[in-house]
Amino acid sequence: MVLLLLLPPLPPPLTVIFMLQLALGTIASSAQPYHALVSPIIKDSSTSLYSITLGPNDGGGFVIDLSSPFSWRRCSPRDRLIPCASQQCVAARRHQPDPESCHHPSRLQIDGENSSSSSHQDCACTVTASNPIAESCALSKLSAHDIVIPSTDGHIPKANILVNGVLFACAPESLFRSFPSGSSGMASLSPGSFSLPSRFKNAIGATVVNKQFAICLPSSSSSPGASFFGNGPFYLLPPPGTDVTQFLSFTSLLKNPMTENNLDYYIDVRSICINGEPASFLQRMLEFDSLGHGGIKLSTVAPYTTLRSHVYQPFLKLFAWSTRGIPRARKVKPFDLCLNTSALGSTRVGLPVPWIDLVLGNGRNWTIIGANSMKQVSDNVACLAFVDGGERAEQAMVVGSYQMENNFLLFDLVGQKLGFSSSLLFRQTTCSNFNFTSSSL
């Protein structure tokens, strides 16, 4: 039988993946050689949010976020609370949510800090956990929790690894609003010292393992993508497999120079081109201003790329002109340009519409093809999946998750650079082609 390269094998349901992970063997000891950890990424069809699994008992998984200082979850009485006088607590409390990210931010207060009779050695560390989708915050106890995650040789999952003492905030039920049904919490993939990439680097331990992680977001809720923590190679099917790290381009990861303790990932975009023609706006509109506003941020919780109005309007005008030969359809919120695709056909990289290039500071292009630029909203209607963020948007551009689907993104936290593949459809594979169903054990 000949396997079509463009049709990835359909992975089993999430519950089956959990069972397969359990069957991979006993918990690996620290002496067992491995260079990375791996976890499936599941797309929720109702919310279009993406979750990773952190063991067989974490329910619906943890929604991934690239900016949060620490993860949060439903805690149990078995979890060890972190003392408020500990160094971990002092460091965690340096990270306060931006007031604009919370409609009702809580005032942070350590238990007993206003009571002269309370012992700081006995009180539990209290932090402010935030939900970036609902823009809500809640005071939460900081706790340590042990998780289990498979190791990998880059081809398949290997032995399960016990990671001790991962810090989570104990979130109340109110913080789960707008999350996928059955979610266990939120997973921080930020560059902060309390994020999962930092903790997993310590768990792997070997000095040859880089502090880095990769995400490959799936485009379907029925087929998981993959997340990796550690060193490559990372192989995607079809056999014999493609090491995606071999064809990555790299660009610098930037920090917001004016915002203290900012944990967002920014990239240096100089212009936006459509079919090679730049949209007509000044380059400085993409840069940080003197207050730290602006820049191009990466986000897994923003469903579509959002542009400040001064950038969005010339971008929309150029894309509309470049597609002037395609019949229009009635607009569908939140989009401003929709096309009638009944006679348009399709290609192996999506609808045949002009490609969009994010032109980076080092001359590389992050190319966005039809599969990532057009959202099919009905059988014969597709809309340009970019959104107007308004004239006062905090960032000039927020690259959303739809534009990341089936793109392999490698975050090197030491080298401060981002490796990106552009669409894997060019390589005749997808993010759903990591082999979670096999084991060498």
Image (tube, rainbow, N blue to C red):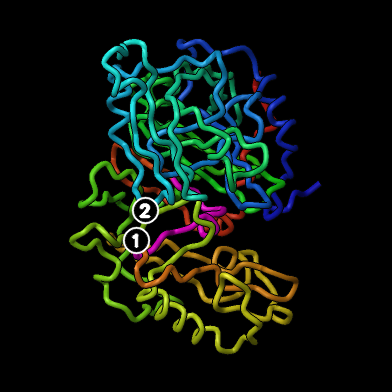
Task: Examine the rendering and report whether any part of residue 226 can be seen.
Answer: no
Residue at (62, 67) in percent of width and height: 375
* 15 is higher (above) or lower (below) than 355: above
Q: Which mark is residue 100?
A: 2
Q: Which residues are magenta?
A: 395-409
Q: Left or right: where does residue 251 sit relative to residue 422?
A: left
Q: Tell me: 401 left or right of 330.
A: left
Query: Residue furthest toward the bottom?
Result: 325
Camera-nearest residue between 359 and 139: 139
Asked whether the residues under the numbered discs 1 and 2 touch, taking CB atoms below 8 Å apart as contact, a structural biologist would say: yes
Going from N to C along the chain, the mark reached first, 1 or 2, is 2
Q: CA distance from mark 1 to mark 2?
A: 10 Å
Q: How far from the left and from the top, in percent, is residue 419?
A: 40, 48
Residue 343 appearing in the image: yes
Whole-percent x and y of residue 192?
A: 34, 35
Q: Amino acid at mark 2?
A: Glu
Q: To which residue does mark 1 refer?
A: 394
Q: In the rendered structure, does residue 439 fall within the stretch colored magenta?
A: no
Type of amino acid under label 1: Glu
